[in-house]
Amino acid sequence: MTTREEARRHAAELRSELRGEAASRGLADAGPSLPERLYAARERKGVDLYRAERDTKIRARYLAALERGEYRELPGSVYTKGFLRNYATYLGLDADEILRQWKHERGDAAIAPAPQIAVPRPLQAPRRNFTFSPVAIVAVLLLLLVGAFVTYLGIQLLRYAKPPTLEVTTPSTAVLEVSDDTTSYVLRGTSIPGATITIDTPGRTQPYRVSADAQGRWTAEVDLRRGRNQFDIGALDPETGKPAENPARVVITVPFVQIETPVLTVSSPVDGASFENGAIPVSGTATNAVTVTVKADYLGPAAGEPGAQPAASAKPAASAKPGASAKPAASPAPSPAGRTVGPVTVQVGEDGSFSSPLELSTGNWAVAITATSKDQRSTTQTRNVVIAFKGVNLVVAIKGSGARAWLKVWVDGKVSPVTGDVGKVFNSGKVLTFTGKDSIEVRTGASSATYFTLNGDSLGHLSDKSNPETWLFQPPADPKKTNRR
């Protein structure tokens, strides 16, 4: 075997050995990259870059560069190794393994080329022009490196001795008045790259905090309230701990407007309406209001129910005075089982409309709808409705931390397509609604995690056991356990 062939064979064996070592250490191309591992570890730890910056004393922009794999943004390989070792230890990773993967992804493990045979060259006459010797080249490179290092140290010393700068570019003036409907404002400015900007305002327990980007630009959105809003802005160099010598102050004024009482129009439900299920659509329009609150008070059993008594129908209350809530007119006294559903609060749309479905059980109810303005002025209207369920309306909900339940449902004796013939597994938070004429039967694999609401009445879970059970719902009879599978 020739010398060249032996060198080629040696190089191939070395490449194979490096690939095997990388695969055994989990550094194969199929695994996650180093930036992905760092980012995933920080997400598992549940901290952001600024918290990691405070804990590791490494600037957030350097941590972000490590998680993006942009090593050129770091001071140098020596600092990069130190940053990686400290950051990996902080995240609970193997620091030595992280450094090996970094070197591997940078190509430090490249295989040396095969040795080549040097062929003697004929002697040539010495040249008269000047040539660099290897010693001279090494000396020049060392001088350049020393000069660069001294320059870097000088820049760092100057930076540590000089406090960060701070300038507010938006707004352009220190005192500003905005329109009366303005609720927030975006402050902008400049400082040193990576500086921490704090914005204090009276009445807020914690200041706003943002960081300047690589160009020193920062942006912060602040909340405004009516009247005078004062913002004191400062800058802090996270590496030196020095604050800006000249903090800034911005004053933004939001004018007060005349307070008006909301105007409420209820389109649904109409007074005295009767519903055959408990889903009551509550909708309408509200002017000069931001929220609408819906609450229902139980007045007594509906006609035909046990305990029902004839009584005059209640009428809506008279218009309320500004700032006061209207009360329902006189109505039959609530039954001993009287109760309240709600309140449920919804936001008023930009066009003034609102909608809020309300789930009620069988009986007579007084539904109170209240519109409230930004200044806490309110207007209330009341609607009396009757709920008389027909058939069977069953709501099944899976509840519990990490709970799961297998369900199979029969509606009027037939398997529901929602669960199918073999049943289906549902996770916690799933809510299913079934409607039948005569009966609904439910088999659950986790009875303690399965909650039921029958014709508007919450039954909760029917058993504290976690084993499978089957329940039959056939009102007016009480739910009962069966052997159906």
Image (cartoon, rainbow, N blue to C red):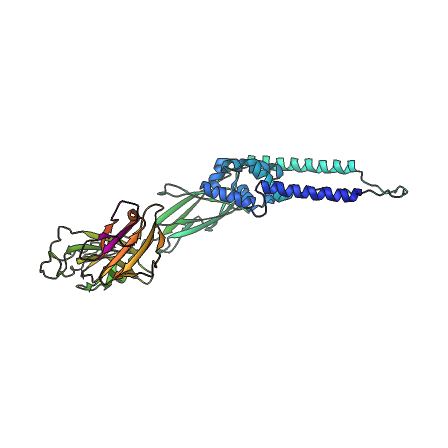
Q: Which of 55 and 311 is in front in this view?
A: 311
Magenta segment, principal secondary structure?
loop
Q: In this view, does 319 lie to the left or right of 37?
A: left
Q: Quadrant of residue 288?
A: bottom left
Residue under the point 62% across and 40% down = 21
Give the residues drawn in magenta, as a range.
Answer: 462-485
Q: In this view, does 173 lie to the left or right of 15?
A: left
**Magenta stretch: residue 471 in it?**
yes
**Magenta stretch: residue 14 in it?**
no
Say if 99 sits above or below 343 in the image: above
Res 108 visible: no
Res 35 visible: yes
Q: In which quarter of the image is residue 131?
A: top right
Residue 39 percent coordinates (x, y): 51, 44
Q: In which quarter of the image is the N terminus?
A: top right
Q: In this view, does 302 lie to the left or right of 235?
A: left
Residue 119 percent coordinates (x, y): 84, 43
Residue 411 percent coordinates (x, y): 27, 60
Residue 236 percent coordinates (x, y): 49, 39
How many marks do you count on the picture? 0
Q: Quadrant of the C terminus?
A: bottom left
Q: In this view, does 18 lie to the left or right of 261?
A: right
Residue under the point 65% across and 41% down = 17
Say if 364 sits above or below 124 in the image: below
